[in-house]
Every structure is written in C-alpha cells, then in structure tokens.
Image (spheres, rainbow, N blue to C red):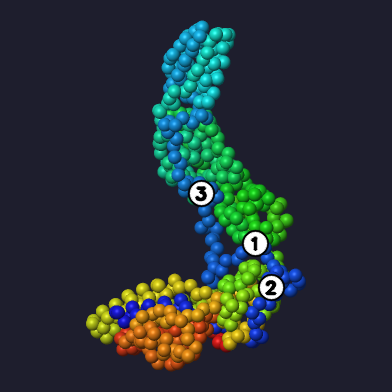
Amino acid sequence: MKFFKKIVFSFLLSFLILSPSYAEDQGTNVNAAADPSPVITNSSDLITAEDKPRIFDEGLPKTSRSGQSLQPFGANLFAGNYVSRRPSSLDPNYQVIAGDKIALRMWGEATANEILPVDANGNVFIPDVGEIQMVGTRASEVSSKIKAAVGKVYKDGVDVYANLLTASTKEVTVFVTGSVIRPGQYSGLPDDSILAFLHQAGGVDPRRGSYRQVLVKRGQQRVASMDLYDFVNNGSLPKVLFRDGDTIVVRPQGSMISVEGDIRNNYRFEFLGNSISGAQLIKYARPDSSVTNIAVSGTRDGLPNSSYITYEQFMNNRLYDGDSVRFVSDAPTPVMDISLEGSHLGNSYLAIKRGSRLQEVLDYVSVDPNEADIGNIYIKRKSVAIEQKKNIDEALRRLERSVLTAPASSDGEAAIRAKEAELILKFVERASTVRPEGKVVVSDRGKVANIRMEDGDIIVIPPKSDVVMISGEVQVPQSVVFATNASLKDYIAQAGGFTERANEESLMVVKPNGKVIMGRNPPVAAGDQIMVYPRLDTKDMQFTKDLVQIVYQIAVAAKAVGL
C-alpha cells in the first residue's frame, strides 16, 4: 500500500510540472529587445487592445446552462437576509399607528405636560383644541402637525413641543400564501416590507410562483400589488401598513422564456400576457454589445419551430411561453486577443490580425535581456489544454475499467484485488482533477518556432534563473545554485543522493519552457528542474504497468512533437 501511495504522489507531482511539446517550423533567433515600445503603429500588421483582458481558463471548456436549469429572474432576491426593524431606534420616516404615544408640552398662556395615546380611530385629544388625526404622520412631522393645530386655537402666547415618545411594539400577523415555499402565518411589525414577509415564507417558489404578481389583500379588498421586476431593476417597493389578518398572495407563474448566450442576465424571464416583443426582453436580458444574431426556438401552431435572425429582426419579433432564446456573437472579426506573461515590458494584452505568427508578435515585444529568458519562451494554448485533458480522462477510464473487471482465482486474491481497486479509484479521482496548462514548446537552443497564433494564446517569457531544482526520489529535495562544470549526478549528490526507490536508469530534466529530456545523464542548465522517478516493481501490484503507461503518457503528452 505504501508503494502505491508513492506511485500516486509521483504521478501528480510529475503531471503538475510537465506538459506537451508542440512546434512547427523553426524560425530565427529572438532578439532580446526589438522595438523599445510595444505599441504598434501599423494597424494592418498588429493592433494594440486597450483594457481588453482575457483570462486563460486553464484549457477547460465551460458548459452552458440549459434552459431547464436556469433560475427565474429575481430568484436571488430571497438569498439574502431581511431584518425586521425594531423600535429601539426610532426611524424619522416611521408612520404613526394606533397605540403609539406622543409626549406633549405646552407653556405660556396654556400649560400641559401629558402623554397622549393614539386611539383606535387614529386620533389624539388635546383639551380646548380637540381631536387631531395622527395615523400615517411621519415621526419627524408629529411636532409641527400638533403645533399647527394648537396655533389655530391659541394665536399668541403658547409654545408647543411634541414628539413621538414610543412607537407601538405590537406585532401583526400576516398570512402568506399562494406559490411560496412555506405558506403560513407570520409575525412582523406593521411597517415591515412585503419582501420581509415573503422571506419568512421561504420566498417565491421558483418553479410555480410569479415574480410579477404579488398581491396584498385585506379581506376581499386588494390593498397593494407588487412586481418584483420593478424592485430588482428600479428599487420600486410599495409602502404598506399591515394589519392583523392581512394576506400576501403570490399568484401562479405566468409565461416564461429561457434566455442564454452572450448576455449579462442568463435567466428564465416571466412576462404578463400572451406574448412579448424582442425589444422588451432585451431590456431585462441586457445582451453584450458584440451580439449580432439571435436563435429562437419554441412551438408555433402545435409544431416545433426555430429561427436564426438578426438583432434588428429580433427587436420586432414576438415571443411566446416556453420559447428559448440564445444571443450569439456571430460576426467574423479580423483580430484575435492574445496576452503576455512573465518578464516583458509594456502592454500585457494585444489584439492581432488573424493569421499572424509568433515572430510577428515578438517583434513588438520589448524585454530586458538581463531579466528575460528569451531562450525558453513557450505558449499556453486553450485547444492544447482541452486535448490534454481529454486524453488523460480517456486513459484514466481505461485504467478504471481494467481494475473493476480484473479476475481473481481465490478468496485471498479477491481481497487483495479489492484493496487495489479501492486505491486505484482514489488515484483516478484525484488525477481527474488535475488541469493541464496547455503548454506549447516553441523554443529550443535560442530559436523560436514561427507558429501560427490562436485566439486566446498566452505568450510566456520566463524570467532568468540561476538555480536548479531537484525533486522526487532524492534524500533532500531542494534548489541549488547552477554551476557550469556540474553534471546531473553532482546536483543529485547535493540533494543527498538517491533514495532506495529511485530509478537511476531514467532521469528527467524539465526545461523552463516545459520541454522534457530523459536519460541516464541528460544535460542541465540554469532554471532546469531535475525529476527523479521511483523504480516501479511490477510484482508489487497487478496494475503497475497500466499506471506506468499513464504516467509517461501524461509526462510526454500524447500527440506532442518535440523540437
């Protein structure tokens, strides 16, 4: 078992540092610093891109969500938290309700120092002044309203000060029903928002509920209605003072359209009525500026229907319940984006003409010859990373099948095979998560292959290094200073020598550009990494040969062509 763990560790370690070599015809020597400015003046050859970053996604394709898995627009409203306001700190916009208390002080011709309750009719009573309607008055306006009423009776000689002393702490119970997650009766303050009560009920049911029709009913009377789309887009929220027994009803979901593609909002959108125009949908979907065409599929007159129309045609196109819409950027572009990493001067992102080759790009890249290792330039390419990942996954699936179908001649052997299978499956699980970088080796002995560039390529110019790394089956893995007169065995001696499991017959040197050299005594240069693999005894485990094949397949990356 310990031996197998060694194999797993060696596999993962080797894969993380290795990648395939790939090259076309060799070009000329790379200049240390071509033009001192990376900005290109001849736009027909190369165009600089401003603020157009492209992030390399490690070569893995992103799976588009299907219309069935899209969330309704507005569903994330209930992913946050709604905290009910408590009267410990009075809100100046709080509106007076029955049961509140108001402090009144009068001095001068008439005096008073009283606490006035707001009665069930919403009034307060002041002797010699009469009833004053206070329900719905904001806390900040209480004093001015009472002062105005007193001033009508006492023209001069009376000063008045009034303020809302305590807001009513009485909670109300509201029924939340319809298409919500947890229908029921919930408590809150009278001025809590509709959203706060919906949140207590778990929010709108994303499969059944409407985000466009939320009603507040008091008996048979409709008190308010709410369109959650207005709140999401504009912050519009109707103000309702709830009473005991009020009901919030979420109506059944209306017509839905699934929207995907090059847009900012990948959601299912609900609309009221039988149809909606493309122009109305665009306001919610917010397509990217690059969109040129729209694919629409659905049902018309009981039969499947699909169309591929221009952006202008889509504006007046009618959409119906169940339609799927995909926004597509389908216009051919004469340029493609690339980026630069590592030791270089100037811009990190460029837009180049399609069909450009590496040498044309490097002519406009400035580097410091004392810092940049121009002899080990390489490229990270998305298409290579995808192919690497595909090949690795296929090899791991073959290994998995061979493990699960391995025969056993006795109960003892069956138990051993079961343990082997358990470890192999863990190995497959971990190995399947490794993501290739998609390295393309384009440099060798100071020359760079003049290969054709692809959209999304990343040109990496490594910094110069004066050390050599030694890892794997050595006593003390470490980095040591490069010496011109030192051999590979000298470096291994500085790392304490080989371990008992080291494979001394086949050693590996990995160049900074990802190129791999194997043998008993390969040459070593500054910046290289020396890898010592374990000696694999095929008698220890039935599937060791399969593992060895996978390890070396990944190490040299199938379909790679070395320089």
Q: CA distance from mark 1 to mark 2?
A: 21 Å
Number of the front mark, 3 or 1: 1
Q: Residue at x 69, y 71 (%)?
A: 37
Q: Residue at x 51, y 29 (%)?
A: 92
Where residue 51 is drawn, which disc sits there? Answer: 1
Check contact, mark 3 vs mark 1: CB within 8 A.
no
| Number of other residues with Cα within 10 Å of mark 3, as a class: few under 14, some 14 to 19, many 20 or more | some
Q: Is residue 373 visible?
A: yes
Where residue 491 is drawn, which disc sits there? Answer: none
Where disc 3 sits, the SS reads helix
Where disc 2 sits, the SS reads loop
The amino acid type of the residue labelled 3 equals Ala
Q: Residue at x 45, y 11 (%)?
A: 112
N-terminal label among 3 and 1: 1
What residue did someone put label 3 on? 75
Q: CA distance from mark 2 to mark 3?
A: 53 Å
What residue did someone put label 2 on? 36
Q: Nearer the viewer, residue 108 or 232?
A: 108
The amino acid type of the residue labelled 2 equals Pro
Quarter of the image with the N terminus in it: bottom left
